[in-house]
Amino acid sequence: MWPVDKIARLCYDHFRNLPKRGKPELGREWTLLAAVVEVRENPNGEKIELKVVSLGTGTKCIGRTAMSPKGDILNDSHAEIIARRGCVRYLMEQLRLAVLGESNALFCPAEEVGKWKVHPEVSFVFFTSHTPCGDASIIPMMESPSQPCPMVKMEDDEGEGSDTPDTPDTALKRRVEWQEEQANKRHRADQQTHQAVGRPGEEMRTCSPPPAEKAHPVGDPCKASETPETGAREGDVAKERQAPDVHRTGAKSVPGEACDPKAPGVRYHNTGVLRVKPGRGEPTLSLACSDKMARWAVLGFQGALLSHYLQEAIYFRAVITGKCPYSQHAMQRALCNRCAQVTDLPPGFSIHPPELLQSSLEFAHSQAQTQHSHQSHKGRVSPCGAAISWCAVPNQPLDVTANGYKQGITKKAVGTPLARSLISKVELFHIFQTVVTATSNVLLPSSLRERELQTYWDYKQAAGAYQQAWQQLRTQVFSLWPRSPRELLQFR
């Protein structure tokens, strides 16, 4: 059993102890929090040490036109992605210590020459204060939307953005609107769902009609039997069918996927489809956190670069969500079921669905709590524009960004190393290169010795097993996953 509240409190306390810079303004701004917790167990399986090794906050993404071919801007600053990138930075530092012979490093030598593995007593848990954006956040409204998550007070808690979930005001408005619908309109709503697909002159024209066994509106009985019900309760499915409405996500279906019907109530969204996060006035190329986390359950969260050195991918044993609107069925559907049947993965990769759990403790800076404590003279409630990254490394563990660059930099500094986030692609690439340099020739993985590698793209593509696993996942499940333009990955 995972100590879910203990882990949630550990993450919240860690955030509270960070410097003020980048944190939301109390009573006016809200943000999301995510963290990676390293767990050490004794031979009896008892959790003897819990340590936050990476923490992130943030709600924003940049549009596709702002993406940089230098790899020096953060495209996706949602908390879950910030926390994962910070953890990659931590893993690279631990790997560097291992190749230098540090005995207390996270990694130990694997059976294959030049490969490493995480010590067997160590595992990782992912914590997020809110359900991931995209598919996992399309859940039924079963509680009073005026205050969906009464806060659980934490000891010594002084009350310490963007894919925007429903606010209490909009949720309440939506509930009232639904109640005004007469029961005899239900059948007509179902008809409208089918008529909306492909209707001339509407947004649907840019999307495909729902595939027969892939995209289903919430509450469709076909969806419940689509995949094995591992960890999902039938009661959750029944509640979805009875729910007057669903919490909605701002993430839009990727090109080629079925567009949302936007019919009244629970049939507003399709489920099980890939989505991209909304940008500020223009589309993004950033996949929803639900989709990225589903991919981690197959490819691991270490990424392609670290895969050169690892005998096995690194997976999260559990995903713990803070107190918020939550559906076990939706989380299971979004993070586990879609990839459950992937086959023909190369050695070192397998299906590792995380255990899905929820804490009873809510983040003090959640949107619901900020709305609840808001005072009108402070202006409207809005998502915090900054993103915080902290990871357990000895040098510069804290990194605060805004709009993809270091917070506070001048326009003149944009494009220089001074403006880069420490978890940007190019910075992580340079850290990885220091690991390669520190590795003796006899212990250098064969994938790094076979041909001359120069660019970020070269190193990623040379991670053969990782690329094979990703190809299997893309072919079998995520065929519509957008590809990053190659010209954005040619930096050194």
Image (spheres, rainbow, N blue to C red):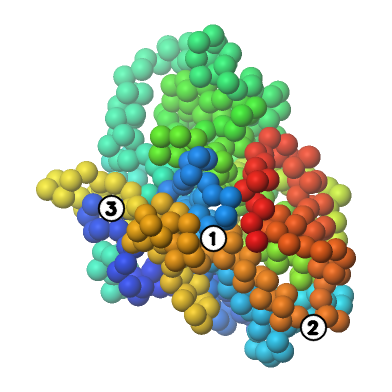
Q: Residues within 10 Å of mark 2 (few under 14, many from 20)?
A: few
Along the line of sight, the residue nearer the viewer: 354 or 66: 66
Q: In terms of sequence position, does the residue under pointer 1 or pointer 3 come before the other?
A: 3
Q: Residues within 10 Å of mark 1 (few under 14, many from 20)?
A: many
For the point 50% across and 54% down, the residue is 74
Q: Which amino acid, mark 3?
A: Glu
How many labels were placed on the picture? Answer: 3
**Vertical comparison of 344 with 349: above or below:** above
User: Rounded to the nearest whole Å, what is the CA distance between mark 2 and mark 3?
Assistant: 49 Å
Q: In terms of sequence position, does the residue under pointer 2 or pointer 3 come before the other?
A: 3
Question: Which element is circle 3 on?
Answer: strand
User: Rounded to the nearest whole Å, what is the CA distance between mark 1 and mark 3?
Assistant: 25 Å
Q: In terms of sequence position, does the residue under pointer 1 or pointer 2 come before the other?
A: 1
User: Rounded to the nearest whole Å, what is the CA distance between mark 1 and mark 2?
Assistant: 27 Å
Along the line of sight, the residue nearer the viewer: 432 or 179: 432
- Would residue 416 appear left or right of 173 to someone viewing this image? right
List x then y, in percent, for residue 122. Answer: 65, 77
List x then y, in percent, for residue 166. Answer: 37, 39
Give the quarter of the image for residue 212.
top right
**Vertical comparison of 305 with 51: above or below:** above
Q: Which amino acid, mark 1?
A: Ser
Q: Nearer the viewer, mark 2 or mark 3?
A: 2
**Vertical comparison of 339 with 157: above or below:** above
Q: Kindly identify which residue carries mark 3.
A: 29
Q: Kindly identify which residue carries mark 1.
A: 424
The residue lying furthest to the front in this view is 412
The residue lying furthest to the left in this view is 377
List x then y, in percent, for residue 303. Answer: 67, 60
Mark number displayed over residue 440: 2
